[in-house]
Amino acid sequence: RRFALASLLLLLSVLAMPVLAESLSKVESSKMPVLATDQPLVGLLAIEGRAVAITARHAWVLDAGRGEWVPSRWSPATTASGNLKGVAGNGRFGFLLRGAEDGESVTSVERLSLANEQLASAPLPALPVALNEVRATVTADTLYLGGLDAAGKPVVLSLAHGAAKPEWTLGVGWPGTTAATSLVAQTSGILVTVPVAGGENLLRWTADAGWQDKGPVPGKIVPGSARAIGQAHVIYLVARDDGAPQMMTFQTITGSWATLPDSATGGVIHVAALDDGLLWASRPEAGKGVAFESTQIQSSKLLLRWLDWIVIAVYLVAMLGIGLHFYLREKRGSTSDFFV
């Protein structure tokens, strides 16, 4: 009987888990000011929590109140280190990817900083190998680049961007010869998504196990939309069944995917990490310029719903009932039996 009661309580707890998980998170979206420019956006990122929009010749910083885009005196054209090929950032640090004018390869990187409301850039060491179709990700201390070398072989480069003398380290590229649609570093691992027949697969690298296949992606990843959040989650923008992309999370420990409610968006042209979520750019429905929207993960103020409280109450009553039952039964025996 004790085993049966314990099994019943365990079953109730398991049934309650999806309800608790569902009620603990939500998303909150907000519109950002439209950037009035006819130039195509080359990159979008955030530095120290401030959104930065970059075209081939100009750059804008969203003011502290997030009500207006402020032109920067710095522009990508002020340096002679090559054409801008893309950007990388994690919401705090930002980097520019550069390459030759006559090709698509990335050959150098600059670190972008923000001081006194103005942007500035500083060159980092040149890449040991030129990379094509580059995806980038940034952690608190490391910049990672993943792409294809001249022979079409996947290559991963890493650089400790906070070091006094940063140097590039050549890592092991993912299996196959396909370019990645996203690259993200999470704690001790690196995750990439690659196209396969019928969809995309998620691969994860760790120093102990190397590259491992983590199974199919439940849809199509918006290129470059991955960002790590917390200690074990990665956010992706995923398009499912030809619908508008939605924010989904991948749990690196359990390998499970979850869709964040009310996070659908359309017409995304660039994505960046911002605060506890994503910032994306799109073309406005009417007029010129670039529209922006921020979608942030929020903790629900009401963490427990009525069904959760019922499960907790049943659990506590059952535990008290079990204790009372065995107390009364054993009380009829000897004192030594009771304490045993």
Image: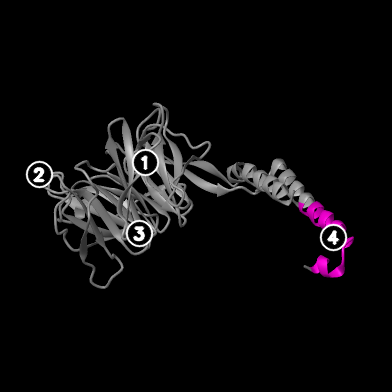
In the image as oriented, which residue stretches furthest toward the right? Answer: 332
Residue at (25% x, 53% y) in the render: 145
CA neighbours of label 1 inside 10 A, class few (<14), some (14 to 19), many (20+) = few
Image height of 286 relative to 333, above or below:
above
Mark 4 and mark 2: span between their CA atoms? Answer: 87 Å
Question: Residue flagged by tag 3: what amino acid is it?
Answer: Phe
Res. 93 mark: 3
Identify the mark nearer the N-term, 1 or 3: 3
Q: Identify the secondary structure beneath mark 2.
A: loop
Q: Is the residue under label 4 in contact with that under label 1 (CB below 8 Å)?
A: no
**Quarter of the image where one finds residue 326:** bottom right
Q: Residue at x 39, y 49 (%)?
A: 227
Residue 330: which numbered mark, if any? 4
- Depth-wise, is mark 4 or mark 2 nearer the camera? 4
> Which of the two residues, 245 or 58, is positioned nearer the viewer here?
245
Marks 1, 4: nearer the viewer:
4
Label 2 neighbourhood size at 10 Å, few (<14), some (14-19), many (20+)?
few
In this view, 310 is above or below 92:
above
How many C-alpha atoms fall within 10 Å of the one at disc 4: few (<14), some, or many (≥20)? Answer: some
Q: Looking at the picture, how far across and down is residue 284, in whole percent?
A: 39, 32
| Cα–Cα gap, marks 1 and 4 | 53 Å
Residue labelled with disc 1: 215
Residue at numbered disc 2? 102
Disc 1, SS: strand
Q: CA distance from mark 1 to mark 3?
A: 31 Å
Q: Which residues are magenta?
A: 319-339
- Give the secondary structure at mark 3: loop
